[in-house]
Amino acid sequence: MHPSPNFRFSRRMRVSVPVLLACLLAAACGRGSEAPKQTEAPAVPAAAKVDLASKVTVTFTSGEVSVFSTGTERPATIGDELRASDVVATGEGSTCELQFGRAAVVKLSASSRLAIASVSPDPASGANRLELATGNVLCKVAKLSGDGSFTVRTQSAICGVRGTEFGVRTDAAGTRVTVREGSVVALPKALDIRDLADRAGIESGPLLADLERAILASAPVVTVDQELAVGVEVPATVEILSTQLESAMKEMAAKAATGEESGNTARIEASTRLVVAATALMPKPAPATESSRAVLAAFAAMGVQETEPVAVEFVALPADADILENGAPIARGRLRAFYPPASVRKFRIERAGYAPRDYELVVPASAGAEGASFTVELEALPKKVNVKTVPADAEIVRDGNAIGVGSWTGELALGAEAVFEARKAGFASKSVTVSVGEFTQTEYLINLERDMAAVAVRTKPADAVILIGAERVGKGSFDGSYPVGDRLSVTASLPGYKKAAVSHTVSGTGNELVLELEPASYETELSLTPADASVSRSGAALPGSPLKLTLLHGERAALEISRAGYATETVELLGSEALPKRTVVKLERERAELSVTAEPADAFIELDGKPVGSGSYRTRVPVGDTVKVLVRRKGYEDFKENIVVTASQAPVRAVLAAKILLGTAPVSPVKLVSLAPSVGGSLVAADRAGTLYGLSSEGATLWSARTANDPNENGAVAVSGGKAWFTGTKELVAVSVADGAIAARSPLPPAAVDLFGRRPVVAGSSVYLTTNEGILSASEATGAFSGKIPIEGGSLMTPVAWGSSIVLADQEGKLLIVDCASGSVVRSIPTSVVQSVAQAPRIIADVAYFAGRKGHVAAVDLAAGKALWAIQLPGGGQSAVYQDLACSKRGVYAFAKKTVFALDAANGAQLFAPVEGAVAPPVIAGDLILVVLDKGRIVALDGASGAVLGEAKLPATASAAPVVVEGVAYVPLADGRLSIVSIEGLKGKK
């Protein structure tokens, strides 16, 4: 694009555009793929006379060059005279040269824009200023005379010379100045003396000339083979110094206006020092790069023309050929230039695809001589062409002559036409025509196609599927074409038929194929269990061993397999691809129902060693099999029987006989004194030596814990909250029922020492223990004694918990209810029972039952606070009761003088006659009363009538009352063992 016709050059605009060095000029002469646009210009003024001595003249153009003058645009032509404010612009791939009188020659490279800011009537002796907006210029300046100057300003720098050859390039990054000969003074734009003078009001004259000479003399100098880059950004310090310089110049202008110029010399020196300080901040000149020196090679063809020139037009064909002079590109396709008369110009014309040509142009002796226009046409080079074939062994023929196989490479002249043909047996021949032009392709591929032949396929039956290779091509029939020589694999398939296949090589004729399918048959071998089973089909026996059966597609066969003692089975077979190679038939034995019923109903049943359930079980078992039946339950004798199953098998009824003695387990080397139930069916026992034992439900010892309460004649264990509490002659101790570890212990104060069997009781977070003076309380967590509840007259009983209170009787027979929170007696209920020892009251439905050392037994309604009844056992004061009563809603049972007394719970009347020979208190087991007797006996009595329901012999005499857990009575023995008795087994045994 050309600059706008309305373009006006201004210094304000120049300040905003960066400038760069002209070391990249060679890029402006690079060629493109199309011929450059040629600006139409007037014919060469061959006879015109041109004065180059005292004005700016266009002396050379190539390509698109425009001049902007007084708001209009025109194509530049050689001989044009340019004036101040004119702008010259070159297009892409275009160049232009301007001659400034006898002073200088300036060459504009491609895509450049140069304004003539000012020009002297005599360029050699006046001031010449150029403004380079963008692009690249080469300046060849002759030695100037007098006050003559030549400066080039860009958007970031100003360059001044008196005689030199240099290049300037500017773009968005800044300005780059390169010197070929002589020297160049370069300053940043902020130090442009002319701009500063304009702002300071200094007009042209001696003052400005002196100032400019002084400043330029102190500015940085770029010398031969050096270059300097000036960026678009101006350092802040330089801006400050520029402002100071402007102020100094304004002062000089003011003094000059009043005629006081006596101090200007000092002011100029001061200004010079500011410039020196500012330019010290600029980059330093560096050696010119190779690329920069190469660009400056174009200077060789440049020069100020001293004589009257001759206008010459030189045309190179093709139109985009490059024209070089002295090895440097100067134009493309066409140039118009002024050359000295009779001079010789040596050009070289080059273009890709053409032979280069050197041309010596002899300029006519005068402007009017013939031959001012010259044309040189390059000769095109032959073009290399490559022809290839597919397949690679095809023959290549040209003009009837074989020239290669698979590939041919050769040269063809520009404009020639050649026909290449590829041939191969079994393939259709094919040709390609190559017309050689400048942009003709060089690679050609001839792809031959195979000769084709018709192929027809028919099937019997007509609905069979046809495949050629793996591709399904039809059903029943197929017609197609295939390359001659190809080998085809053709198959036909149809359910119920065997596949038909043929391999066929395609020929020119005779490619009709018929595939006939045969019906399919399928064979299976019968595998029978038992192996001697019989097989029949439609009533006819099938022979053979092993038996094999062949079926046609779709054929069905119903086979009957039978054997004595086995259930007959019918097998349906279908002839198809799904028919297995081996058919397995396993006959099931004839079965009969086996029913087992157990008594009691929760007994476990096992068949052949495998648990199958409890109570009852039914299953079907092969006739003739022997089944081992086992029925078992804890506390009962096992039922065992081998059943040979018959076709009419009778139900099996297994009635278990209850065991009496389930086992005896050793516990202690000395007598067991007491036994208490614990958690999870376990027990805690205490022996005569004060040792505690944890026992499993089978009587196995889980742990033992020795205490200081040795000897222990009557001490019993109280289990609460996962702990077993035990007292006696020395200490209050608690052990964990899980592992026997000591959980708490405290020594007993003298008043709490006991020989009769008093037990502690746990209520809330405290443990309570009676003494001869009252009740002691201890921490449930540690066993440490923490308080005392006084009881008037004292108590020898074991207390019992009732809600938030504890209940016990004092020695005078009053039943006391003590509030645990306050530690005070909240109710005292008088009775006839005196001197209760060791035992604890038994509470059933808020009625407390207790006895005393004088044989009295009483019942007290705790809620009402009154005695319900009181009696004295037979024998009076001789029937002392020291151990807990056994109580139920029906009766109250006391142990005194080796006798068990049975009383009605409602009124204290005798239920049945006393039972003599007892060695320990009785224990209630449902409706039964269990009593251990002397001579190692245990009896089960009816709780209402006293009738003996069962009796058994123990391994030794019992040493304490039994404990009943889940239908089992655990009896501590005098020899330290534990006897385990089934209550169900005991019941009914006499």
Image (cartoon, rainbow, N blue to C red):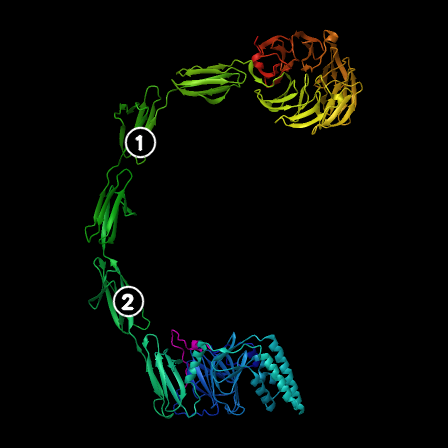
Residue under the point 68% across and 21% down = 709
Name the mark on residue 378.
Answer: none
Q: Is residue 24 magenta?
A: yes
Residue under the point 67% across and 7% down = 914
Using the rendered view, name the quadrant where residue 699 is placed. Answer: top right
For mark 2, what is the residue? 386
* Along the line of sight, the residue nearer the viewer: 934 or 39: 934
State whether the magenta stretch is mostly helix, strand or loop. Answer: loop
Mark 1 closeness class: few <14, some 14–19, many ≥20 residues within 10 Å:
few
* Along the line of sight, the residue nearer the viewer: 408 or 542: 408
Q: Which residues are the magenta region?
A: 23-42
Using the rendered view, name the quadrant where residue 575 is placed. Answer: top left
Give the mark nearer the N terminus: 2 vs 1.
2
Q: Could you tell me residue 426's position as x and y percent?
A: 21, 57
Left or right of residue 96: residue 750:
right
Q: Is residue 176 visible?
A: no
For mark 1, what is the residue? 582
Q: In the rendered view, would you say 605 is above or below 71?
A: above
Q: Tell me, yes or no, whether the two marked residues, 2 and 1, touch with CB atoms within 8 Å.
A: no
Q: Is residue 266 magenta?
A: no
Q: Secondary structure at mark 1?
A: strand
| Residue type highlighted by circle 2 | Asn
Q: Is residue 508 visible?
A: yes
Q: Secondary structure at mark 2?
A: strand
